[in-house]
Image (cartoon, rainbow, N blue to C red):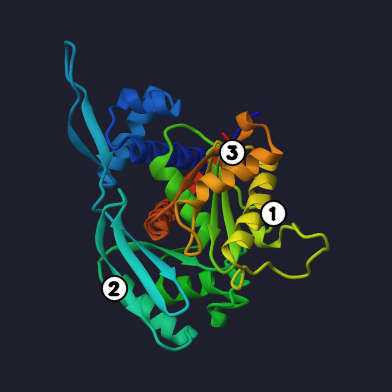
Amino acid sequence: MKKALTGHPNMLKEVNKGLIKSALQRLQTATRVELCAETKISQPTVNAIINELLAENVVIENGVAKSSGGRKAVLYSLNSKLCYIASIVVEEHELQYAITDIDGNIIKDGFIEHENVWSIQELDEQIKEIVSLKKNVRALAIGVPGAVSKCGMVSAIPKVECLEGFQLKKHLEELLDVTVSLSNDINTVALGYFSEESKSNKEYACIHIGNTLGAGMIIGGQMVSGAGNFAGEIGFMQTDPEIRTKELSIKEMGYDDIILVVSKIMINTICLINPEVIAIGGKKINADICGVLRQNCMKALPEQMLPEIIYIEDERKYYLEGLSKVGVDSMNPAIMLVRQNNV
């Protein structure tokens, strides 16, 4: 059951503005009537908010709609050049970045290589340089190979030890005076894949097979983070006869052993969330793994319950796209309020 939002009228106004901006982001262009249908907001309210967003230069006129007779309706779109998002992938010895507009179009991108172990000061310097590449960067989205708490603290990140237990979100917001979002790497890949590839409101699981295992899960169109942002840490899933006390490492495993472990995890994942699609990627595998995993799953589960299994060749592409989406959403806090209240 949907919850009603109550409180100060200004809060409801901001929620409605957020819904309209989010709708324009999805639709690219829309008339006022189309925005009413998409958001379920009344026509007078849509008219008032569109006029306000036009005055703020957040929304611009973008031509007219085709007419079947009578006056042609004006099309509106978000002003994609109003501000920009910096997305940065943090890895053990490199940073990959992309600066995008709010439509996800890449303005600048590149790599920064680093031979030594990162320090906080070195990361600060490089991140500041990336953000300065384009004026009006309003949001910074950082992806890390570790767990991220709701307050923005990083943990379980052996590849970048200086970030272990570090309040990275707060630190960067104070350093750069921009809105900062932190995301786990695999969750962000799943979000990027879902945003680009989904044709309907499907359930997805995205599994990464590197030296360790990770997963991102989308249910009902929303990323599942869990109470402590620990959802998807499938490397801790128990698949052995005896209980393990630490995260599973497959660094030294042979291909057959990796197949067996991933098959067990996939079967458990299907039983838990019954996804329509499981997308698999990582340096330890290739596209041939999909057929083998499906055969193993069929040994334990009814064939009609099996999801479509897809190999992701370019995880980094979806990683950056997911980060860009996280950055755009962070500039629209009303949408986060709507999602939390399920309205």
List the residue tagged with mark 1. Answer: 227
Location of residue 28 with respect to 144 vertically, above or below: above
The residue nearer to you, when weighing 282 against 88, is 282
Disc marking residue 275: 3
Residue 114, position as x, y percentages in the image: 39, 84
Q: Are marks 3 and 1 in contact (CB under 8 Å)?
A: no
Residue 284 lies left or right of residue 233; in this view the side is: left
Q: Nearer the viewer, mark 3 or mark 2?
A: 3
The residue nearer to you, when weighing 157 against 294, is 294
Q: Does residue 120 appear anywhere in the picture? A: yes
Count of marks overlaid on the render: 3
Residue 236, position as x, y percentages in the image: 70, 62
Q: Secondary structure at mark 2?
A: loop
Q: Residue at x 35, y 61 (%)?
A: 138
Query: Which amino acid type corresponds to the residue marked 2 in the rendered image?
Result: Ser
Residue 131 lies left or right of residue 282; in this view the side is: left
Location of residue 308 with respect to 129 vertically, above or below: above
